Amino acid sequence: MLKKKGKPTRGGLTGTEQAAIAARQAGLLDAYTENLNTTNNLSESDKFKEGYVKKGGKKKERKSESEDVKPKEEPPKEEVELESWDDEEPVESWEDIEAPVMPLPTKVKQEQRKQEKQRKKAEERRSKDNGDQDPVEAVASDLEKTSLHESPKPNVALDLPSGVRTGTEAENEGGQADPSVVQAEREAKKAAKAAAKANSKLKKGGAPPENLPNTTNSTPASTAAKSGGKEKTKEQLQKDAEKEKRKAEFEAKRAAEQAAAGGEQEKTKADLKAERRAKQEAQRAAKTQAQDTKKPQKVRIPDEIQADQAKAEKKLAKTLASQNIPQRTKASRSVPLFSHLHQYEKDNSITKDLPVVGSSIHPSVIQLGLQLCEGKGSEGETRCLELLRALEDVLVDCVNDIKDKDNSDLFKEFDSALKPNLTFLKQCRPLSVSMSNAVRTIKSKLKTLDRSLPLDDLVAETRSTIDDFVEENLNLAARQISNTANTKIQNGDVILTYSCSLLVERLLVDAAATKSFKVVVTDGRVHFRGSEMAERLVAAGIDTTYILLSAVGQVLPAVTKVFLGCEGVMANGCVFAEVGTSQVALLGSSAGIPVLVCCQTFKFTERVQTDSFVYNELRDPDQVANTPNKSLDNWRDMSCIHLLNLVYDVTPASMVSAVITELSVIPTTSVPVILRLKNLDGHLGS
């Protein structure tokens, strides 16, 4: 079979041969583009390796990543001369390899730009500070500043020929640094460090090193340049010399002190801080130990409950002697369990040793004292009212006595007049809670009186002070308590009460005007004061039943409410009342009956008491021996018997349902709140 020969073209190639060359070129182009796509995914190190070519040789052409791959074009129908890889010579050593410059990362370029800006700012600052200063002196001053504050990399300007770049500048521009330039920079940095170190040693007083390079000029011209272009005057030189002398003396003295202390080195701030902290801890530990070993503070105990202490008795005798008040005779037969309370004989009269003329005790107070000794006026409110009226007479007479004393203090005169009279009354009978609170309140109000007032006005103010207290705390408070208690009484109620309380009597009489109810009056020995209460209620038209304390259990099922009076309420809510009150409250609370205590707020006390033994009052034991059969008339001759006549007892707060006051009906837990409010208002005084 004969083959048809193609027409030969220019170059001597036929059409078939030209087609084969074109196909081979197209295949090479496809392989090149594939290779380009794979190289784009290579890492920087792989690209760096593939880019090595021999120095002086032809570099392999590659398309950049940013160029787009062009579509295939038909090759020209011409003869293509192909390059041969066999023409390249093999690489014999690393010195013959020429590596292309790789681009710097973005972060490195930003850091280099920042350093360049800082360097320019530092040069501008130096040029402003130095002014016309010598360039060499400017470099020295910069080195001195950097050595004092911080030691950054020294920035030394090298005197290089024009057109020659430093290593840092070459790196910033992306070029390759010259090794000689880099070596020069390193040497300059070393010299700058050595100069800074030498300057620091010179400032400390040490000798400069021998191999120190001469970086500064110590010529007179440079000295003048440092001092601002002016030479120092003689006076300035003398001042500098004196300053250096004082500095040398201070250093010598400091060195001597260190040598005397054993050659100890100067302490750092951390050492001083540790010493201060250790000292504070030692002081704190000593203070804590002193507080632990310190004796507990003694509580002030009234003289009325220290009869068994010789020191207290001696102090009381001294007080009575100084105020010219006779002391009462101690009881010959005392109860051992209550030996801490004062017990006196009844036969001896307290007024027999009082002086007739020149006595400091007012006649009104003597009269009241005799009534208290005989047991009259046992009701707390009655005794308080009589005390205030007696003290009113004392104060009025005191005002009349000091009218001729121009420079005297009014309150001191009042206090001096009240002290002996109150001491006399305490000898007759201990003051109740209401009496003590009333005296403190009156004293606090007397402090506000003006000494410059006329005599008549001063007497009127004194009387008004006492009258206002009586009207506010005795009359108005009792009326308000009566109105509040009437709301608790209903028609058909059976009310149980104990002994005689003026406040309870008033509220029952007021309630009987509008309501119908029954009252059971309970009474007990020794005083039988409940009989007085029953007589007054019967006179007011109230259905009343009178029984003794031992019969309360028999009438308790019919009782609906219990109303009780008291002498005072403690800060812990306990009720201080006539002996026998706690038994009635116990029976009522155990039966589920509401137990209501009626009390004015001026009877509240900050004292805390949980039993009847610590503080109480002992009355005449002969009242206990008063029996119908006269079997105890000779009890003093019997050594095996002791008669005890207690006046008060303490009712726990848990047995009291509520306390009716002039403010409102409050629980026993609210007593401290009332005390706090009264102390803020100054009603109870200090």
Image: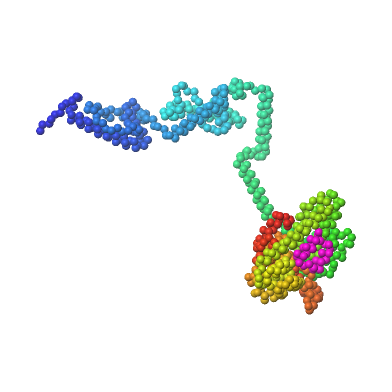
Give the magenta range. 364-392
Viewer-nearest residue: 465 or 168: 465
Residue 461, horizontal then vertical, whole percent: 79, 55
| Residue depicted at x 57% and y 33% | 149
Viewer-nearest residue: 197 or 31: 31
Q: Residue furthest top?
A: 221
Is residue 348 a member of the stretch shown in magenta?
no
Q: Quadrant of the N terminus?
A: top left
Is residue 390 a member of the stretch shown in magenta?
yes
Residue 160, horizontal then vertical, whole percent: 47, 23
The correct choice, above or below, for 163 with respect to 665 in the image is above
Q: Residue furthest right?
A: 357
Viewer-nearest residue: 658 or 158: 658
Q: Quadrant of the C terminus?
A: bottom right
- The total of numbered circles placed on residues is 0
Tell me: 583 left or right of 372.
Answer: left
Residue 404, horizontal then vertical, whole percent: 87, 51
Tell me: 41 left or right of 602.
Answer: left
